[in-house]
Image (tube, rainbow, N blue to C red):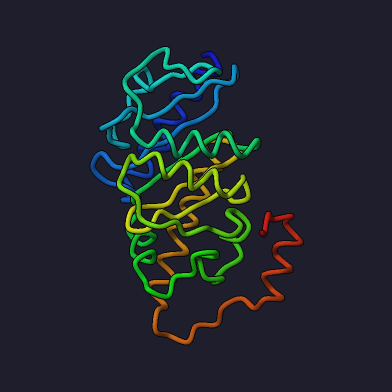
């Protein structure tokens, strides 16, 4: 099996796993990954994470031209913006995960540091998450908003919509976005309770110990 064939199978398997565990439903969410030749494999528009066909993934060449597969997701501006601004990005995942969306609706959600410091793992896998304002789905302005971050964030939360995470590869991106959803769920569960959050010193220690981007 070629490297690209393995990547196609991995994308479909990870997407199906997230769908089956309720992280995104229906035909929501999209996923992409870099190929060895600098191109991209992208989930097609209107497809379900539970039923992605590896052979029908949208295939782009290194110049950004669609050269095979079905029509890609309308959220391509989001994916392109991450690849263009983060040289380490090998994959991008976007979900409509329930708890992350719920936390984005809270009036006191911190736009610059979306996730409260409840555990070290979101810090380790995501760094600071930027909360972006609401955009109509598919609006190219979403990509411009990501470009405006100049590559400083690996994860953003689209208000009233869902999280988007870039990772070094497709497994890392999926693991990180699941950590984002888990932390948002914890935040919802603990809302109104005087929970013991990590202190600034504890956060700083995690950032230093694991060489986390923290800007």
Above or below — where is 179 with respect to 53?
below
Where residue 22 appears, as percent x and y from the top left, is 31, 51
Camera-side residue: 167 or 141?
141
Camera-side residue: 12 or 213?
213
Above or below — where is 109 with respect to 162?
below
Q: Quadrant of the C terminus?
A: bottom right
**To which quarter of the image does residue 140 belong?**
top left
Where residue 30 appears, as percent x and y from the top left, is 38, 37
As drawn, is 202 to the left or to the right of 13? right
Where residue 169 appears, as percent x and y from the top left, is 57, 35
Q: Looking at the image, which residue is at 38% across and 74% down?
A: 107
* View extreme (bottom): residue: 194
Camera-side residue: 138 or 105?
138
Q: Looking at the image, which residue is at 36% across and 71% down?
A: 106
Q: Looking at the image, which residue is at 32% across and 58% down?
A: 160
**To which quarter of the image does residue 38 belong?**
top right
């Amino acid at each position: 099996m070629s490297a690209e064939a393995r990547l196609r199978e991995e994308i479909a398997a990870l997407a199906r796993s997230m769908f089956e565990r309720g992280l995104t439903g229906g035909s929501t969410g999209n996923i992409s990954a870099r190929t060895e030749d600098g191109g991209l494999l992208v989930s097609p528009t209107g497809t379900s994470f539970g039923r992605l066909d590896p052979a029908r993934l949208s295939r782009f060449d290194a110049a950004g031209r669609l050269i095979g597969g079905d029509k890609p997701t309308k959220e391509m501006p989001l994916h392109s913006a991450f690849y263009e601004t983060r040289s380490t990005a090998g994959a991008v995942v976007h979900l409509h995960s329930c708890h992350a969306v719920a936390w984005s609706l809270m009036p006191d959600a911190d736009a610059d540091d979306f996730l409260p410091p409840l555990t070290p793992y979101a810090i380790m896998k995501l760094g600071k998450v930027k909360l972006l304002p609401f955009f109509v789905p598919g609006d190219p302005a979403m990509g411009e908003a990501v470009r405006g971050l100049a590559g400083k964030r690996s994860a953003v939360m689209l208000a009233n919509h869902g999280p988007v995470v870039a990772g070094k590869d497709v497994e890392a991106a999926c693991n990180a976005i699941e950590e984002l959803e888990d932390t948002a769920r914890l935040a919802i569960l603990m809302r109104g309770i005087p929970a013991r959050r990590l202190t600034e010193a504890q956060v700083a220690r995690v950032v230093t110990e694991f060489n986390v981007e923290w800007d």
